[in-house]
Image (spheres, rainbow, N blue to C red):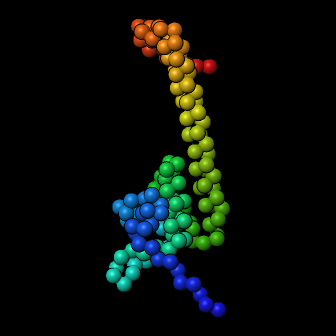
């Protein structure tokens, strides 16, 4: 049986695939966020596999959703330790899910206020009374 050689990608290629800058990729390596040590080619340049690209995409989503670098590092450490840490990884992800769900709820509340303000402005603009919007300061009444 023949084995298919792993595709090795340069840091520039990985940057293009993940949307992470080369600086961020180096930083993630320094911070211990990779599951495996980053490999280097014969010229000493970093090379990455498709699996590492997939991991980086997960890291980017965790980071963009507000997970702290120490928590991402903890998740990577747990993954390196193997299947005995599955429950801890699950708990870490569930806690982050809860945080993200609260952020979504907060953003939905903020969006409702913004939409109320837009409706207020639209009404005043249509009625030709927009100059009244700031006559006695802004109307900060919460929209129900």
Position of residue 78 measured from the top left corner of the image (x, y, whole percent): 56, 66
Residue, x 63% and y 56% (percent of image)? Answer: 91
Position of residue 44 in the picture relative to residue 37 (left or right) = left
Q: Is residue 95 visible?
A: yes
Left or right, 144 with respect to 55, comes to right
On the image, which quarter does residue 2 sit in? bottom right
Q: Residue at the location (52% across, 12% down)?
A: 126
In the depicted structure, whether residue 75 falls above or below residue 5: above
Instruction: Please give the name of the residue rendered at 55% of the width and 35% of the height, measured from the top-left corner.
Output: 107
Return the residue found at the far bottom. Answer: 1
Asked if residue 17 is positioned above or below residue 47 in the image, the reply reads above
- Locate the N terminus by quadrant: bottom right
Q: Residue at x 52, y 80 (%)?
A: 6
Q: Residue 130 appears at what percent x and percent y?
A: 45, 11
Give whichever of 1, 56 is nearer the camera: 1
Q: Residue 134: image x %, image y %?
A: 41, 11
């Amino acid at each position: 049986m023949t084995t298919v050689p792993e595709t090795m990608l340069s840091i520039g290629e990985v940057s293009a695939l993940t949307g992470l800058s080369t600086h961020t990729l180096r930083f993630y390596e320094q911070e211990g966020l990779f599951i495996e040590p980053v490999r280097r080619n014969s010229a000493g340049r970093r090379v990455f596999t498709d699996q590492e690209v997939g991991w980086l995409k997960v890291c980017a989503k965790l980071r963009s959703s507000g997970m702290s670098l120490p928590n991402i590092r903890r998740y990577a450490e747990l993954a390196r330790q193997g299947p005995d840490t599955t429950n801890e990884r699950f708990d870490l992800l569930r806690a982050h899910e809860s945080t993200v769900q609260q952020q979504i709820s907060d953003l939905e509340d903020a969006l409702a206020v913004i939409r109320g303000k837009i409706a207020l402005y639209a009404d005043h603009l249509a009625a030709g009374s927009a100059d009244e919007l700031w006559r006695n300061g802004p109307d900060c009444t919460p929209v129900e």
